[in-house]
Every structure is written in structure tokens, then in C-alpha cells.
Image: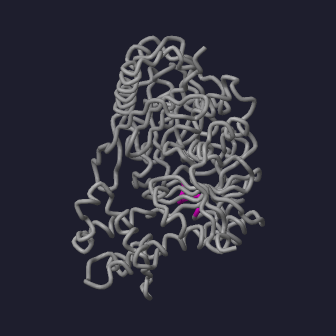
Amino acid sequence: MPSPLFLSIDFGSQSLRTCLIDDKGCIIVKEVINNFNYLSPQPGFVEQDCKWFYQQLVIACQNLTSQAMADKIDLSRIAALGITTMRNTLFNLDENGNGVRNAIVWNDSRLATKLPKLSLYWRLLFNIGNVFMPINDEIKKMQASAFINYIAEHQPKQWGKTQHLLLLSGYLQQQLTGHYIDSNANIIGYLPFDFKRRCWFGKFAWQQQALAIKPQWLPKLISPGKSIGVVKNEPIKELGLVSNLPVIACAADKACEVLGAGCYQDGQVHISLGSAVTITRVSDKFVGPKAFYPAYPAIISGQYLTEFMLPQGLLLLSRFIEQHKSSFIFLCKDKMKDQSLEHLIEIYIKANKLAANGQAFDFNKVNSGEPIAQGFLEPDNKDVFAKYIAVVDAIITGIIDSIVLAGKRFNSPITQAVVTGGGANSPWLLQKIADAVQININKPKTEQAGCLGVAITLAVNKGLYSNYQQAVKQMCQLDAVYLPSSKNNN
């Protein structure tokens, strides 16, 4: 009897990935839609029509199933469907599940100014606490960043029509099943969610009072691995799938990526090397990265993810290469034309044993937007390779600082890191990270860790593995291990 397949969907901010994955973690068919365009009615606003998100899902799944049938894959082997998505993307829906306004995407920077008022009890309590810590400022910052507070202030008519409030994961699942249900590991956003207990806060909690939300708008929450429902007849036809396909609750993008990378043990660290760099520690303890910031629920019950972020990340290198392209053009020889410019630069640096030669780049100043940091990236005919290495070193320093902080927050060291993302394709970069942090760096085979995390969740749901630990061992394959040079020399 053919082994089951799992339909894994990973909806990010710039791409949508759909994969058919088998019970060994191998990708059988893959479809990717890239380069999304969003609406920006005002500077800093990022939004899109609600239906657009579902339409992208339909297109991707149609292309995937067409590929599968062309490869003579029996679609009845698909045992379940699961979705992971970008976080904090908000959908206001009416009683029929239709959008009352465009969905607001996580990187939107609008701020509310008219903030909901807390009860006298909480105001008195926080005023007392504010003597010792800036509690009031942090609460106001959170309230201002909450999209729902902006909508209540500036679009009261749309706010009044709202009957359901969902994140992107919940919206796509509702479109497929008709149920207003989401995973309790998906609620990463400005909602009255108790990250430690994985449930909604009660009506007297300050988190409820701080947001212009009615409790009845919020979806029912279930644990990852539980069934949300089956795909309705109309979506089944639109997506080209088989009937009675169950939709299983999964988790937010980072939680799925961490699990799909093979991180499931207390103390492991996952490093995602993308446009933004994130450092995530897996733990059995609920410890946030800093005061007022929570840890996030992991897929495995009782585990949490403590996340540190370098917002600019490898985007800095992309900007640097683009602005200095004329200085690197000599590397693009015909015999190397299939290599990326990033890879050619690294080969040249390694072959010539180049270093930063005293060049220093202040990573923190870029994140604060100071002109001196922006100037560092501009061409000035100085040693472009030294400056490139200085930018890389600054990123690695940020990673080291986050790992050190992760160790201090838990009062226990980190002994292993797993790296995914576009930057994980650079052996030179991974070796530099291993040498700098002095711990082993594992690189998984998969380049679709988010989709694999979804597939692992589905495999456990279908009973192929008795627990997540067993599923990870069977479905996550290791590509390489980078040891610190000090260990290699011993």
C-alpha cells in the first residue's frame, strides 16, 4: 500500500510554498509563488484584499496538483492538509466570513493614538508598578501598535461591522472548512492571548481592556495536531484535491520552521538566516527575550520558543552587494555564470584569505537609522571586500550577542544550533558562525523547514509516529555539521 502524503502550506510575506511531503520527510512535489505585491494607501501602510490571500492559495494548490497528476501521483494518498503562515496579519470579517476591510499585514507601521482605557484597578496598579519599571509606556506602545485599535479609531463603521477577528492562518482555515477555529500556537499578534497558558485572557484581564476587541469575535482555539474540520466541497474542487480531506491545526511560521529544522529539545537554538535573522531557543520554561516580551508557544505541548531578532539581517548584505555591484563585476566570468554573486564573493574572500582589515560596521546604528550606518553601505572606492566582511562580522556579532543573552535568560548554556534560511546555503558563512559562537552548527537537508514542520505535525496526527520526537528523528535529515575550527584542529 502506498505511503501517505501530506499537503503542507507555508504562506509568508513574500512567497507561498506548497509541498507534498511523504512520511520520511521527502518533498515529492513543490510549488512556489514569489514576489507578492501589497497595497499601500498611505506611506507605511501594508494591506491587501482578504480574498486575495485565498486566491493565492488556490493558484498554488492548483499548480501543485497539476504537477502531481502529471507525475502520476495518486492524489488520494494525501492524508491531511496543514497551514503555517506569517504572523500578526489581521482579518476583520462580517457574520458571513467576508472581509469588512482589507487585511492589514504584519509589517504595516500605522499607529493608533486614541487608546482604549483600562479600568481604575489596573491604572492604579500599573501606576504603582511604573515607579520601578516603565510599565505604562510599554502598555501604551502595545496598544498603539495593535491594528484593531487603529481600526476602531479611524474606521468605526468597519469596526462595528466586525463579527469575527482572525489572523491569516485562521482565515485560510475558515475559507477551507467554514469553521472559526485556530491553533493555540498560531496566535502571534496584538490579541488578548495568554502565551503561557495558550488560551484567551478573561474579560477582566488588562489585555482584554487594552484592545478594542469583543471576546465573541475571537476564534475557538485548539492544540496543534488536532483536527479543525474537512475541506468543503467548493474549495476541494477549486484546489483540485480529493474529498473528505482533513485540515489539521499547526502553528505559526517560526514554530513550524523550528520543528522542521529538527529542533525539539530543551536548550537547542534555531538560527534563521534570511532578510531578517532570528535566533530562537527551544525551552520547557516560559522565559521571554526581555521584560514585557513573551515566549511563544511551540508545537510540542509544554514547550516555548524564546525569539531574538536582527530585523535587518542578510538584507544588509543584499543592499551592500547591489550598491557595490560594479566593484564585484570582475568575478562574473563565463565559467562561473551559474553561480550567485554572493557565492563568487565568498569564494574570492576564502581563496585570498581576506579579512576586515580594521573596517568596523555598527549593526545597531543601521537598525536605528543613523546616517553614519547608511553611509557605510555607499560606494567610496575603499576596500570593498574588507567592508563586506565587516558587515558579515557585524551580523555574526549580533547572533553571538543573542545566543549569549539566550544563555543568560535561562542561566544555562547552548550546546547546539541548527541553521536554515537562504544564508544556510553558504558554507563560508556557516563556518564563520561556528568559529565565532564556538558551538556545533547543524544544517538540515531541507530548504523548506516550515513545510516540513507542518508535515511532521500531520504525520503525528495520523498516527504514523507516536510523538513529535520520534517523527523529527525519522523525517528530519541532516546535510552537514560545521564544527568550530578549534575542534577541527584537535
Counting from the top left corner in percent of width and height, residue 387 is at: 38, 79
Residue located farthest toward the bottom when viewing the structure as drawn: 358
Residue 145 visible somewhere in the drawing: yes
Given residues 475 and 410, the one toward you in this image is 475
Quadrant holding the C terminus: bottom right
- Against 163, is 387 above or below? below
In the picture provided, is 75 more to the left or to the right than 271?
left
Indicate whether residue 217 is drawn in magenta: no
Instruction: Kindly indicate the quadrant of the structure image that contains residue 449.
Output: top right
Q: Nearer the viewer, residue 234 or 467?
A: 467
Q: Nearer the viewer, residue 282 or 173?
A: 282
Residue 415 at x, y percent in the picture: 71, 62
The coloring applied to the image is: one colour
Q: Quadrant of the N terminus?
A: top right
Q: Measuring from the top left, give residue 248's x and y in whole percent.
A: 59, 26
Q: Is residue 474 above or below residue 231?
A: below
In this rendering, the answer to whether 390 lies above or below 478 is below
Magenta segment: 138-142
Image point (50%, 49%), residue name = 146
Q: Is residue 141 magenta?
A: yes
In this view of the protein, can residue 307 be seen by the observer?
no
Q: Quadrant of residue 192?
A: top right
Q: Nearer the viewer, residue 416 or 8?
A: 416
Q: Is residue 109 above or below residue 373?
A: above
Name the chief secondary structure element in magenta: helix
| Left or right of 39, for residue 355 | right
Most distant residue in the front direction: 335
Residue at 45%, 11% in the rendered image: 233
Residue 367 location (% of width, % of height):
44, 70
